[in-house]
Amino acid sequence: EHVARQSRMPWWWWSRSAPRLGSLPSPIRPDVEADTLGASRMLATEGTGEGVPSKGFALVLGNAKEILSEEGPHAEKRKRRCKYGWFWKKLDVRDDELFIQTCCEPQNKVDFLRLFKEDGFVVVDAQTGQVVCGGFFVGDVSAGAGGGGARTTAASAMATQAGGCWVIMASEAVCGSVHAPQPPGATFKVFDCTSTAREVPIIVAAADPTRDAEIERQRQKVERLQRELARERELSRAELVQWERDCQQWPWLRQLYDDDRTLTYLGLRGKPIGADGTAKLATAFERNSTLTALDLCWNNIGDEGAAKLATALEHN
């Protein structure tokens, strides 16, 4: 049930819920890679339409102009020859302005999915995200990794050609649909400009709000500690000793310097902080930006202390 529910998530969730897969050569834009991964997850979990699972697929992310360069006629009229192989004429979609960033939106999804109902790879330009053709077959597979099927060999070979390509591949065994989820632990094979594949999970764990909140709290705690450490490094030993003394005398001082985002009110009513404490308070105001209310009734501040506070509040 959990897997089936995830398989119905929108395509952008699949795309943005995973970190980058690795370093890419400069022609490959990270956002295009992320959207290609998202579209692949949609295809692997929802199928090619009407609840039909894909029979396996591969997307090539690279320099499309280079991949399809030196085009010419093929022995078969239905095909088109190019520098790195050949492709079906009917699946040439360069004039359709189909982009990987929006290919899973309702108005584009049918045109995108039809490319996967035929054998062959789908080629996406790594710089613009334009889907340029389907039914692409690699001509030279001699550089491909052995030990796998024909699709794996071709995918690993293509990753090292045309200046380096990012190829993501799914076998028929790991593809599912909204009615028939893929097996647990199913993974893509990703060839990141190399003939060696890496396994990337198809299903990404759903977000856990409680866990995410705890991670955020820990991150904020680390940041506070880092700020405090940086502040202490700026102080000489004598200043550090004086700082500890000040905090013992005026405990509220550490609260202001800790940049506690929840500290909006500070009540010092009836606490004789005196002129020295007022001077420390004024200095703290220059660092603190969260305090909105301050109670200083019945304090021996004096005219000089009041002037210092007024000046500090102008910059708070």
Image (tube, rainbow, N blue to C red):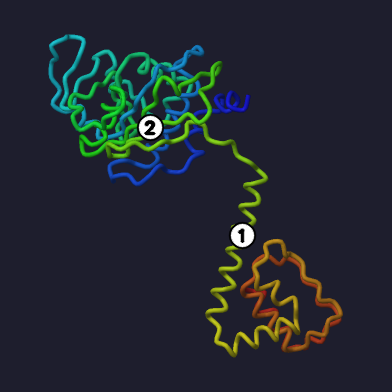
**Relative height, residue 314 to residue 197 (above, below):** below
Q: Which mark is residue 293?
A: none
Q: Which mark is residue 189?
A: 2
The vertical placement of 313 against 26, above or below, is: below
Residue sitting at x 61%, y 85%? 240
Q: Position of residue 171 (x, y in %)?
A: 39, 23
Q: Position of residue 203 (x, y in %)?
A: 51, 31
Query: To which residue does mark 1 refer?
Result: 220
Quick one: label 2, few (<14), some, or many (20+) residues within 10 Å? many
Residue 4: x and y in percent read: 58, 23
Front residue (pair 114, 309): 114
Position of 298 compared to 233: left or right?
Answer: right
Q: Label 2 sits on what residue type?
A: Lys
Looking at the image, which is closer to me, 244 or 171? 171
Q: CA distance from mark 2 to mark 1?
A: 36 Å
Quarter of the figure with the C terminus: bottom right
Does residue 299 appear in this view?
yes
